[in-house]
Every structure is written in structure tokens, then in C-alpha cells.
């Protein structure tokens, strides 16, 4: 999905803009949400994530964390005169539903910001729609570098494609190399078999891992590509077993990574499999009872170790959500908080609550969040560049190493 159809996007945007009244310069105002009796204005924060399907464990954690941020902002009257509401849509982890959701969110004049999506490939299908509507989008999970720095970033030419796109997650430009440095320098693995699922996230992550690993002096025992829906890896298991690989690096997500690792172990290939944040889920451990010794990176420091996250963790538990906040819970809470703080800044500055004013305010936010200081650089990327390596141990993810990537 790296090359989306400009025609489809344009039609989607035009169709959306005809569904409701527009403010000046084409942006939508939130005035329709005002209540004459209470003197409050309703501002909706959209959420796009996989709420059903294989990746729903991560998506539900995103939705719930945004919901918590909104409820708490209303309880404390964080923005006087504004009541926040959530509008969560299911993209099932696929680009087409994500694009439809983007159009639906744009068509609602009360929506002044969106948290999501989870997947880089889904983000690619949504960015143009949100940018045309000047609607701020803050992803807690996207790591594909070109989303913020353009397609030529790897050659040193960085150009921000969309002013409305932001993220609280670090990019694969540092996540893949961080994993490579760990496997080569810490785990002492010099020969790795590389596998990716051909999606934007998985392929991009594998590419940045490969570049750093070979630069360090490591060699690739082989390279293979799978489909995200594959669950039978017999052919690849055979190739890995005969390759002499000391580890497997997988660019992809936990629904396929779990069965892949399990089938390797059951075939006697008792080498660690390592992946990125899309693999670092509790569901990976459920899918793979033989995951002991596998590794996964995650953006940021372990949330359970952060003093700044203690209240979030306690409040999430007290709220009674049946689904765990998972890998991106803290980042989702911070993404929603960035939009809330932007609304607050726009309103305090005497500006109309329009999409363009909120978008511009998101660029300038800086506050102490769950995951640390939340702020964005000139590309819309988080200024938080820390990462963590986890290892599967006794049915849980245990911290192996945390730090800042040194490129």
C-alpha cells in the first residue's frame, strides 16, 4: 500500500466535504456541538484502530486508553466550556476500511482530532484525507519512517508530506537498527535469517534491521517473505533449519510471528526469533507456548517502570476495562492528551475551535505525559527516541535492555 490512488482519495475527500458545513478556508468548526443552556461545546476525538480481528488486542487497548483520557479531561474540566466525546471506528487492520473511516470522521464537523491508526499501511490510506481537511491525526503506533519524512528519507532527503500527521511512537529508522545492535552486540548473534510479511510496517522494519546488522558485520543466512495471513510455515522452517542461522528476525506482527516461532521450536530449531513492537503483545505469548527466549523491541521505555505512568496504570485498572492497555496504551493516552491540550491552547488563545487551529496547536504542544515529555519535531515525529528490548520469559515479556538508540 505504499502507492495509493490519488483519485480514490480525492473523491473520498470531496464526498466528505459535501456532507457538512465548512468553516473558513475549508476547515470545519465545532460550533454545531454547542449547547446554549450549558454554554459548552462538544469536541469529538476520533479513534481508528483494529477493534475486531487478529490485531484487536492492540486496537482495543488503544480505544480504551483514549476513552480514559477523554473521561478524565471531562471530569477535571481540563478545557473549560468543552465536553469531549469519543468516536471509535474499526479498521480491522486493513487499509480500505481505514480509508472509509477517515472519510467518515472528516464528514463529522465535531471531530477536531483523531488518534490512530495502528498500522503503517492503514495510515498511508488515510493521511491525504485528513490533511486535505486539516484534521490532526496522532498515531500511537505507526513506525514507518516515510509517513513523516517522505519516501526519500533513507537517502538523506527528508521532507514532511503531511502537516496534519503526528505520532507519539518512535520510527523504524531507530527501532530496526536498535534490534540489530542488540542481537549483534548483546546476544552475540552474527548470522540471522530475515523474514518479513511484505506489509509496509514489516518490510520497512526488516529493511532497517538488515542495513544496521550487515553494517555491524553480521551476515544473513537467508531472506524470505510471507503473507500476513499465513499460518503454515513448514517450507520456511526447513530453510531456516538448514541455513545455520543463529537467530531469526521477523518484520511483522504477532498473529503470524507466534505460529512461526512455535513451528520452528517444534521442528527442533531452538534459536530465538526477534521482532518489533507489532510482535510485543501478550497474545504472542498465548499463540506460542514455546516462546521462551524470543525477543521483541518496543518504542519507549517500559511503561510499568515509569513514575509518570503509575497513575495511568492505576486509573486504567479502576476504570474496569476488560481488555488490557497493551503495548500502545500509554502512547494512546498521550496521543489523545496532545489533542486535548491543543484544543485547550487554541481556546485559551482566543481562537476559534477549527481543525486548522487545533492542528497547528498540536505541533506546539509540550507536556509531561504518561510516556514522558510529549512534543513533536518539525516532521511531526515524537521527540522521545528511547526503546526497549523484551524477552519472553515464563509466559511474560520481561525487560532485557532499555536505552536510547545511538546511530
Image (cartoon, rainbow, N blue to C red):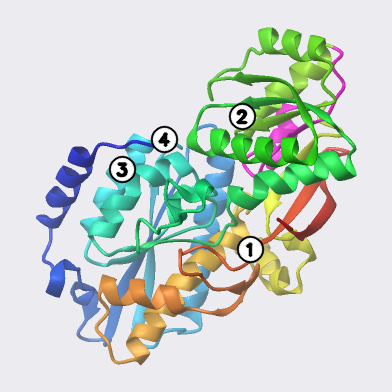
Please name whichever residue, 102 or 87, is drawn nearer the observer in this view of the structure: 102
Number of residues whose C-alpha sits closer than 10 Å to that of mark 3, classed few (under 14), some (14–19) or many (20 or more)? many
Q: Is residue 249 magenta?
A: no
The residue at which mark 3 appears reads as 99
Report the magenta residues as a range: 268-288
Q: Is residue 34 visible?
A: yes
Q: Quadrant of residue 38?
A: bottom left
Q: Is residue 117 visible?
A: no
The residue at which mark 2 appears reads as 255
Query: Residue at left 44%, top 37%?
Result: 92
Nearer the viewer's eye, disc 4 or disc 1?
Answer: 4
Q: Is residue 274 magenta?
A: yes
Res 94 label: 4
**SS label for mark 2:** helix
The residue at which mark 1 appears reads as 316
With 207 as the anchor, is 306 left or right in this view? right
Of pointers 4 and 1, the one earlier in the residue sequence: 4
Residue 265 drawn at (x, y percent): 82, 19
Tell whether label 4 touches label 3 (CB within 8 Å): no
Residue 4 position (above or below residue 141): above
Tell whether label 1 touches label 4 (CB within 8 Å): no
Number of residues whose C-alpha sits closer than 10 Å to that of mark 2, classed few (under 14), some (14–19) or many (20 or more)? many
Please name whichever residue, 218 or 88, is drawn nearer the observer in this view of the structure: 218
Amino acid at each position: 500500500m505504499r502507492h495509493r490512488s490519488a483519485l480514490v482519495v480525492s473523491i473520498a475527500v470531496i464526498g466528505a466535504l459535501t456532507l457538512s458545513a465548512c468553516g473558513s478556508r475549508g476547515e470545519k468548526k465545532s460550533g454545531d456541538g454547542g449547547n446554549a443552556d450549558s454554554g459548552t461545546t462538544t469536541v469529538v476525538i476520533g479513534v481508528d484502530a483494529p477493534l475486531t480481528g487478529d490485531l484487536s488486542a492492540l486496537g482495543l487497548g488503544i480505544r480504551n486508553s483514549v476513552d480514559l483520557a477523554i473521561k478524565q479531561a471531562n471530569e477535571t474540566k481540563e478545557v473549560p466550556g468543552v465536553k469531549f466525546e469519543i468516536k471509535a471506528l474499526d479498521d480491522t487492520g486493513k487499509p480500505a476500511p481505514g480509508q472509509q473511516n477517515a472519510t467518515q470522521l472528516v464528514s463529522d464537523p465535531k471531530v477536531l482530532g483523531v488518534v490512530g491508526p495502528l498500522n503503517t499501511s492503514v495510515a498511508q490510506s488515510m493521511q491525504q484525507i485528513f490533511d486535505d481537511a486539516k484534521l490532526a491525526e496522532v498515531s500511537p503506533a505507526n513506525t514507518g519512517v516515510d509517513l513523516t519524512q517522505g519516501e526519500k528519507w533513507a537517502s538523506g532527503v527528508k521532507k514532511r508530506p503531511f502537516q496534519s500527521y503526528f505520532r507519539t511512537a518512535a520510527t523504524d529508522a531507530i527501532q530496526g537498527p536498535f534490534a540489530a545492535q542488540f542481537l549483534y552486540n548483546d546476544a552475540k548473534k552474527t548470522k540471522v535469517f530475515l523474514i518479513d510479511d511484505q506489509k509496509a510496517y514489516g518490510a520497512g522494519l526488516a529493511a532497517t534491521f538488515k542495513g544496521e546488522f550487515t553494517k555491524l558485520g553480521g551476515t544473513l543466512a537467508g531472506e524470505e517473505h510471507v503473507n500476513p495471513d499465513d499460518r503454515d510455515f513448514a517450507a520456511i522452517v526447513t530453510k531456516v533449519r538448514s541455513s545455520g542461522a543463529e537467530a531469526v528476525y521477523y518484520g511483522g506482527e504477532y498473529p503470524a510471528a507466534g505460529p512461526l516461532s512455535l513451528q520452528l521450536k517444534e521442528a527442533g530449531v531452538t534459536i530465538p526469533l526477534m521482532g518489533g513492537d507489532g510482535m510485543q503483545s501478550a497474545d504472542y505469548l498465548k499463540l506460542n507456548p514455546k516462546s521462551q527466549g524470543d525477543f521483541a523491541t518496543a518504542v519507549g521505555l517500559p511503561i510499568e517502570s515509569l513514575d509518570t505512568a503509575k497513575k495511568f496504570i492505576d486509573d486504567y485498572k479502576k476504570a474496569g476495562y476488560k481488555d488490557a492497555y497493551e503495548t500502545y496504551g500509554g502512547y494512546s493516552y498521550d496521543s489523545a492528551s496532545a489533542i486535548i491540550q491543543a484544543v485547550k491552547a487554541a481556546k485559551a488563545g482566543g481562537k476559534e475551535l477549527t481543525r486548522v487551529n487545533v492542528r497547528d496547536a498540536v505541533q506546539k504542544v509540550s507536556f509531561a505525559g504518561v510516556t514522558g515529555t510529549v512534543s513533536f519535531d518539525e516532521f511531526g515525529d515524537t521527540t522521545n527516541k528511547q526503546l526497549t528490548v523484551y524477552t519472553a520469559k515464563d509466559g511474560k515479556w520481561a525487560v532485557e535492555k532499555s536505552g536510547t538508540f545511538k546511530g
